[in-house]
Each structure stands twice: as C-alpha cells, then as structure tokens.
Amino acid sequence: MTVVTPITIPLKNIQLTPGSLISIRDVTWEQFEAILQERETEGIRTRIAYSQGTLEIMAPLPAHERPHRIIGDIVKVLLDVEERDWEDFGSSTFRKKALEAGLEPDTCFYIENAEKVRACQRIDLSVSPPPDLAIEADVTSKTTLEIYEALEVPEVWIYTEKKLSVKVLIEGKYVESSTSPTFPNLPIRELIPQLVARAFNEGSRKMLRELRMQMSS
C-alpha cells in the first residue's frame, strides 16, 4: 500500500500485521526523525527505512527474524575462532541527512572498525564509519540496497529462500560476489545456508558448538 500525502498519523496508530510493509511518500527528513523519536518513546517494534522522501515501515515475521539471528551467531563464532575483534550493532538505526537515507539492518557488525565504535552507544555516520558487514533476511524492498549504497556499507549478505547472496560495494554500487571479503578463505555462500538448516533441524546451540569445535581443530 502506498500513501502519497505527507504523513500526519501518529506511528502508534498505524497497525501492521506481521510480515506486512507500508510505503509512505513525501515524508520530510524532519518527519522521519520525529517518527524515529516517537517509536523510541512509545516502544513500537517495527523496522524503518527511508530514502529520498519515501518511508517504509515493516512488521517482521518470526520467520524473518530467526535466520538473521542465527547467521549473526555464526559470524561471531567464525570471528572468535579467527581471534578477530567485532562489535555487534544489531538493528541500530543508521542515517545520513545529506543523502536523505536511513535504515536499520536486520543485523550488522563492525569488524575492521570495531575499535573505532566500541564505546559508541549511537552511531553518527558523519563522524563514524558504517558497519563493515550487514545481514538481511528476505529483503522485500527494492530500495534497501540503494540505501546501503548511500550509507557505503562495504558488504551486505542477503539470506532468502535458503540461499545466501553476497553483495560487495565497488565504486558505489553493489556487485554479486562468489566470496566474502570478510571471510575470504571460507565458502560462505554454501556454508551459511547449511548451518542455518542445521540450526533449525538440530538446534542452534548444538550447531554453534560443533562449528566452533570444527573451526578450532
């Protein structure tokens, strides 16, 4: 559903069923920031993306939430085994006013730049770098990658239909990659779907424990 008039309805009055998405046009940057503030104040659980005056609000399904959480746990194990620093910023809001772009990843990590943001409670992209890796499950919005490009996130993983797509930012545009710059020595595109399937079949704890043992041997 698309609304073409400026937003005037309080966010708490917009009722979305799980898995649904609403797109609202002609939303100013100031309105976008006001909506973020209202959501934080009211404790409203939605995902929000904003690009060039268009606001998208989504109510995730449990089927959307679980895979990216499992993948995030896998990333932590892989980084720990490689003794690399990381900071998990989850679905924090990232935005650039100059480009009128903002979104909340399903999950994201600072790895190469972990030390730079370790003490940060909120990220200001005018002074801090974007996440090194963002993870999305079942992207339904065509604008999502465009926003990531504007925010200059180097690598985005998209998990959908039991497959993993690796997008790498090259000269401002995402290019499909057969390997992950974050884990260049691992077959990430094949490994992640296998491990997610194991988590569903055998349990996340068992899968993660066996993964750590395998990677440490």
Image (spheres, grey):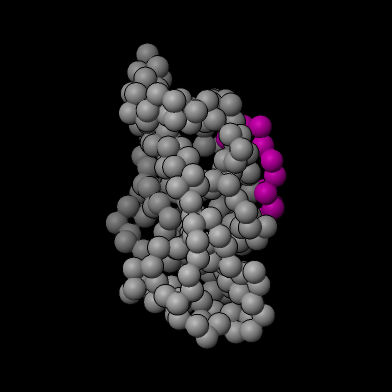
* Displayed quadrant of residue 172: bottom right
Magenta span includes 149: no
- Residue 89 picture location, percent across and down: 39, 52
Magenta segment range?
A: 170-180
Q: Residue at x 55, y 53 (%)?
A: 153
Q: Residue at x 42, y 37 (%)?
A: 70
Q: Residue at x 58, y 47 (%)?
A: 138
Number of marks in the rendered image: 0
- Residue 42 picture location, percent across and down: 34, 73
Picture layout, residue 124 above or below residue 90: below
Quadrant of the drawing holding the N terminus: bottom right
Picture layout, residue 131 above or below residue 121: above
* Displayed quadrant of residue 166: top right
- Residue 194 picture location, percent across and down: 52, 25
Tell which of 82 and 199 is nearer to you.
Answer: 199
Q: Seen in the image, is 76 located left or right of residue 141?
A: left
- Residue 94 picture location, percent across and down: 48, 63
Quadrant of the drawing holding the C terminus: top left
Picture layout, residue 63 above or below residue 206: below
Tell which of 73 and 200 is nearer to you.
Answer: 200
Instruction: Tell me if residue 183 can be seen.
Output: yes
Tell which of 128 and 208 is nearer to you.
Answer: 208
Q: Residue at x 32, y 52 (%)?
A: 118
Magenta span includes 175: yes
Picture layout, residue 131 above or below residue 180: below
Residue lying farthest to the top in this orientation: 217
